[in-house]
Amino acid sequence: MKRFLLPLLLALVGTAAGAGAGWILGGAASSTDHATAEGPAPAATQCDPGTTTAAAVPDAAATHDYARLNSQFVVPVVEGGQVTALVALSLSIEVPTGRQHDVFDVEPKLRDALLQVLFDHANLGGFGGDFTSGSNMRVLRASLLKGAQGVLGPMASDVLIIDIARQNV
């Protein structure tokens, strides 16, 4: 039992420290800085009028915002009754422009739904072996989107996995 508590305690302390650092360092950014960072590259706006490639690609930043969830998700990987690894993920939810506040209003419920999806994925062996393979990540993203839509409805159009790391215990 003590072998299980120490990694879990370390994960919780690390998550709290990371959330605190993210809040302190990332809390000063304004929403205009966020929109500017996701805008089109200058080269895309200065295309030759004869080319249609830049004009054919819709500007996703004009129709969607990304609500980055405040702290990481930490998921234990259990094999044979023992915690063998911890997986940490940072997620963002793609929503229509101006609807980020709706995500943050229900963030506790959304985090609960997404954690359940992540625990189910871990219990099915999704974080074992080559856990970042394309097919495995597609399954995970689809499951996370379904969980997000269970809370937010069709407002959630995608779930982006910003960071993912696995630490063996």
Image (spheres, helix red, strand yellow):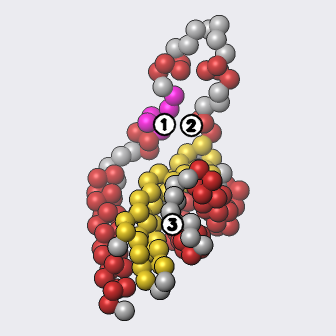
Binning the other alpha carbons within 10 Å of mark 1 as few (below 14), some (14 to 19) or many (20 upward) gives some
Q: Point out residue 36 in the picture as x, y percentages from the top left corner.
A: 45, 34
Q: Nearer the viewer, residue 28 or 109?
A: 109
Q: Which residue is mark 2?
A: 61
Whether residue 16 is in magenta: the answer is no
- Disc 2 marks a residue whose amino acid type is Ala
Res. 128 mark: 3
Image quadrant assignment for residue 90: bottom left
- Disc 3 marks a residue whose amino acid type is Gly
Residue 2 against residue 18 in the figure, above or below: below
Q: Are marks 1 and 3 in contact (CB under 8 Å)?
A: no
3D distance between C-alphas at marks 2 and 1: 6 Å
Q: Are marks 2 and 1 in contact (CB under 8 Å)?
A: yes
Q: Point out residue 14 in the picture as x, y percentages from the top left corner.
A: 31, 69
Q: Nearer the viewer, residue 78 or 120?
A: 78
Element carrying mark 2: helix
Binning the other alpha carbons within 10 Å of mark 3 as few (below 14), some (14 to 19) or many (20 upward) gives some
3D distance between C-alphas at marks 1 and 3: 33 Å
Residue at 47 percent across and 21 percent down: it is: 42
Left or right, 46 with reference to 29: right
Label 1 vs 3, first from the N-terminus: 1
Residue at 55 percent across and 59 percent down: it is: 103
The boundaries of the magenta stretch are: 35-40
Q: Point out residue 104 in the picture as x, y percentages from the top left corner.
A: 51, 61
Binning the other alpha carbons within 10 Å of mark 2 as few (below 14), some (14 to 19) or many (20 upward) gives some
Residue 17 against residue 48 in the figure, above or below: below
3D distance between C-alphas at marks 3 and 2: 34 Å
Q: What residue occupies the far right of the structure in this picture?
A: 154
Label 2 vs 1, first from the N-terminus: 1
Q: Which residue is mark 1?
A: 38
